């Protein structure tokens, strides 16, 4: 009896679903590597590259590549929890903040230099701050539309999904803007000291992502923000009656999401040390939403688990890597992700059980199976 | 004579005002703003760019010729918005259908007319799956159709990652079929008379539009969609099958998306992964500009045409100007969309206050 209780406890745990998903993807990955003739455990191999002083291996690569998604997932989790919708403009906000920061860094010199920034016109910090402020402003705009004008979040963010990329193109003057300063690559790749060695051992995005997650986790743990967000997400009206300022909370959530998108945008532009308005953050919105869903969070708002979303984001990146190793092209990738999303939302659907029961009953009727045979003897005894 | 006297009397003005209010007050108020906006923009363009033949019939038909698919999409989107849902998979669906046409006609040598049928059926099936997920599983339409959008784009790449252009004779005959107008043309700089014409796909689009308008206005299904969008609870109490109505909306929209895919393929015959980018956004913008409300229950199918025309006038402005960067159309589109969304919100607020 107690064993089943422990089992139930494990299954009911919020982290169970995300971890199972991650384990599933890892197992698939092992099978794939084994089938391709590699060692099944090669996934976990970490080796040191002496020249750059950086640890390398599939695990590190996945964590590195997943860091933007992890950062986006933090913001998205809060938005989903609080507003029952999602911020579908994160990709556009990413590219917009990246474009603005490069516009500042090469202030006035871009066009003359054929859209290359060979040296900073303003300090890097100004560019970074500009990006964060742009993200914050986008968040304020969404907060205004959702909290003040009572527009559904997905529609409110739809505007910047179209417009954000357009503004970014206008800011970048329709060109791909490059930054040639070596230190610009640090944020998205590895930090290099004078010897060309990375003192941090790991790629920088991993640290940035870890930092964002840590800050968010501390903020949620030591302030009432997390509780308030869930409260507004579960029932907006009753939280207002309780005395919560739901307008301010919705504003906060969107600003956090916007700033997260800006940080992700800085990493993404730093990775390729240029802002490609067409391709940076392309179709990343679904990945972010998928990360939240894979993390065991309901897309209908309410309770959330930040750790779940982070695991979800890593799971998606692992899935992407596995699919790439199966020689799936980047264009075909959305097909598989969409199927995963559909499966998850069907599993999450509150209508699944009633529909299944109905279906089972129908099949039983079809074959003329006597329902009495299937009733639980215990139940009969009790009645 | 009596008519004249009534016209002259002050009561005619009052009558006209009353008729206008009945027609355009309330729910059609947003549409009225759109029509005024379009007329203003078009007049402005005709005056400013008169040297570039902005105001000619050719130029107007050109807008229709390049937007036939969007007209159908916008009409379908209006219907979905009226039902209280949304469908952002339509642009990706168009890419998928174009690729289906291109791949199966060029590489598998399937008959063009058979392909049209296959594509339309695929659209219905696609819509059916989305509809079941939205209506029977109670999943948010945004999530379902976002997944649908990715599915369709990925599917396009699965069918063929290459760009295929269509050379099928039957299909190209349909694509090149023009209906010429005997009047309204102009003589260009070289002294050649330019006869205005519309393509066959424009006619098909307009037929689909009017058919959908009639369905939404007079059929039981159409009225149920308005009822469900207005208030699901009341619709249920009225005895309407809410779930089935919602599902049918997506099925019809899937069919319309397939039809739009066919029209788009006639407009630009070929298949590519990046075909019809962001078309779902244009369709949503057109529907919203045309007076459909995101809250559901309000909208006019014919209004969506004005939404399309307003957008293509903007594109024309940017093209005629020639110096603006390629981001501007998107920015202006987004600005107009946010203007209308905010207007809707204010409109809803005012009406609530009045009640």
Image (spheres, coloured by chain):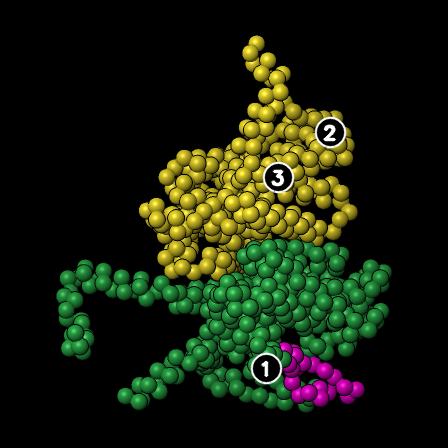
The chain holding disc 1 is A
The chain holding disc 2 is B
Q: Colour of chain B?
A: yellow
Distance, label 3 to label 2, CA atoms, is 32 Å
Vertical placement of residue A278 versus A20, above or below? above
Vertical placement of residue A182 versus B36, above or below? below
**Disc with the residue nearer the chain's start (3 vs 2):** 3
Let me know if residue A25 appears in the view.
no
Q: Which residue is mark 1?
A: A222
Is B342 positioned to the left or the right of A353 in the image? right
The chain painted green is A
Vertical placement of residue A136 versus B222, above or below? below
Is B236 positioned to the left or the right of A45 in the image? left
Q: Residue at x 69, y 35 (%)?
A: B40
Q: Secondary structure at mark 1?
A: helix
Query: Quadrant location of residue A73?
Result: bottom right
Distance, label 1 to label 2, CA atoms, is 73 Å
Highlighted magenta segment, given as a residue range: A190-212
Distance, label 1 to label 3, CA atoms, is 50 Å
Does the stretch in magenta take in A201? Answer: yes
Is B295 positioned to the left or the right of A173 in the image? left
Q: Nearer the viewer, residue B38 or B328?
A: B38
Say which mark, if any, is on residue B188. Answer: 2
Q: Residue at x 55, y 72 (%)?
A: A228
Give residue A7's position: percent from left, percent from top. Answer: 35, 85
Q: Which residue is mark 3?
A: B34
Q: Nearer the viewer, mark 1 or mark 3?
A: 1
Magenta-highlighted stretch: main secondary structure? loop
The chain holding disc 3 is B
Q: Secondary structure at mark 3?
A: helix
Query: Quadrant location of residue A98?
Result: bottom right
């Amino acid at each position: 009896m107690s064993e089943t209780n422990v089992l139930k406890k494990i299954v009911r745990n919020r982290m169970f679903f995300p971890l199972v998903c991650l384990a599933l993807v890892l197992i698939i990955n092992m099978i794939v590597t084994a089938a391709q003739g590699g060692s099944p455990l090669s996934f976990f191999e970490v080796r040191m590259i002496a020249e750059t002083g950086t640890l390398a291996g599939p695990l590190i690569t996945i964590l590195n590549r997943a860091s933007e998604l992890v950062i986006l997932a933090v913001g998205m989790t809060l938005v989903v929890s609080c507003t029952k919708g999602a911020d579908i403009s994160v990709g556009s906000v990413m590219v917009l903040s990246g474009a603005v920061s490069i516009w500042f860094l090469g202030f006035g010199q871009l066009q003359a230099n054929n859209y290359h920034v060979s040296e900073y016109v303003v300090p890097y910090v100004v560019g970074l701050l500009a990006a964060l402020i742009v993200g914050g402003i986008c968040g304020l705009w969404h907060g205004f539309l959702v909290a003040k004008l009572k527009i559904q979040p997905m529609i409110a963010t739809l505007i910047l999904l179209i417009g954000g990329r357009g503004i970014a193109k206008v800011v970048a003057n329709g060109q791909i803007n490059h930054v040639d300063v070596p230190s610009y690559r640090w944020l998205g790749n590895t930090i290099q000291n004078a010897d060309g060695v990375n003192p941090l051992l790991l790629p920088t995005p991993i640290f940035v992502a870890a930092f964002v997650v840590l800050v968010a986790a501390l903020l949620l743990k030591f302030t009432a923000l997390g509780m308030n967000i869930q409260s507004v997400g579960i029932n907006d009206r009753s939280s207002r009656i309780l005395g919560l300022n739901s307008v301010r909370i919705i504003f906060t959530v969107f600003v956090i999401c916007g700033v997260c998108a800006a940080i992700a945008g800085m990493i993404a532009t730093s990775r390729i040390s240029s802002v490609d308005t067409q391709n940076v953050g392309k179709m990343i919105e679904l990945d972010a939403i998928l990360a939240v869903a894979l993390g065991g969070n309901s897309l209908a708002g309410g309770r959330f688990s930040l750790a779940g979303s982070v695991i979800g984001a890593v799971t998606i990146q692992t899935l992407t890597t596995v699919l790439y190793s199966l020689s799936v092209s980047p264009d075909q990738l959305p097909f598989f992700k969409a199927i995963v999303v559909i499966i998850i939302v069907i599993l999450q659907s509150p209508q699944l059980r009633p529909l299944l029961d109905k279906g089972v009953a129908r099949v039983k009727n079809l074959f003329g199976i006597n329902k009495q045979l299937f009733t639980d003897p215990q139940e009969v005894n009790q009645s | 004579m009596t008519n004249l006297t009534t016209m002259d009397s002050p009561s005619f003005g009052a009558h006209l005002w009353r008729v206008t209010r009945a027609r355009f007050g309330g729910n059609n108020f947003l549409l009225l703003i759109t029509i005024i906006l379009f007329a203003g923009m078009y007049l402005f363009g005709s005056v400013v760019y008169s040297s570039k033949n902005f105001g000619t019939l050719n130029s107007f038909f050109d807008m229709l010729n390049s937007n036939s698919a969007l007209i159908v999409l916008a009409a379908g989107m209006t219907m979905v918005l009226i039902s209280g849902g949304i469908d952002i998979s339509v642009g990706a669906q168009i890419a998928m259908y174009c690729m289906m046409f291109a791949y199966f006609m060029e590489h598998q040598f399937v008959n063009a007319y058979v392909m049209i049928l296959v594509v339309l059926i695929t659209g219905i099936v696609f819509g059916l799956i989305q509809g079941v997920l939205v209506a029977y599983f109670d999943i948010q339409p945004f999530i379902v159709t976002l997944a649908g959008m990715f599915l369709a784009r990925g599917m396009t790449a699965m069918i063929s990652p290459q760009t295929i252009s269509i050379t099928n004779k039957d299909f190209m005959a349909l694509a090149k079929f023009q209906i010429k107008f005997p009047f309204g043309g102009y003589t260009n700089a070289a002294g050649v008379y330019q006869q205005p014409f519309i393509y066959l796909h424009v006619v098909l689009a307009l037929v689909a539009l009017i058919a959908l308008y009639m369905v939404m206005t007079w059929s039981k299904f159409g009225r149920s969609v308005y009822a469900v969008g207005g208030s699901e609870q009341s619709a249920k109490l009225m005895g309407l099958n809410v779930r089935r109505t919602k599902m049918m909306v997506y099925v019809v929209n899937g069919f319309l998306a397939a039809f739009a895919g066919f029209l788009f393929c006639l407009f630009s015959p070929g298949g590519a992964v990046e075909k019809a980018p962001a078309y779902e956004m244009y369709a949503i913008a057109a529907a919203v500009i045309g007076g459909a409300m995101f809250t559901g229950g309000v909208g006019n199918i014919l209004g969506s045409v004005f939404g399309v025309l307003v957008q293509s006038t903007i594109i024309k402005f940017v093209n005629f100007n020639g110096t603006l960067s390629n981001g501007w159309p998107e920015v202006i589109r987004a600005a107009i969309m946010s203007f209308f969304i905010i207007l809707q919100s204010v409109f809803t607020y005012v009406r609530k206050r009045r009640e």
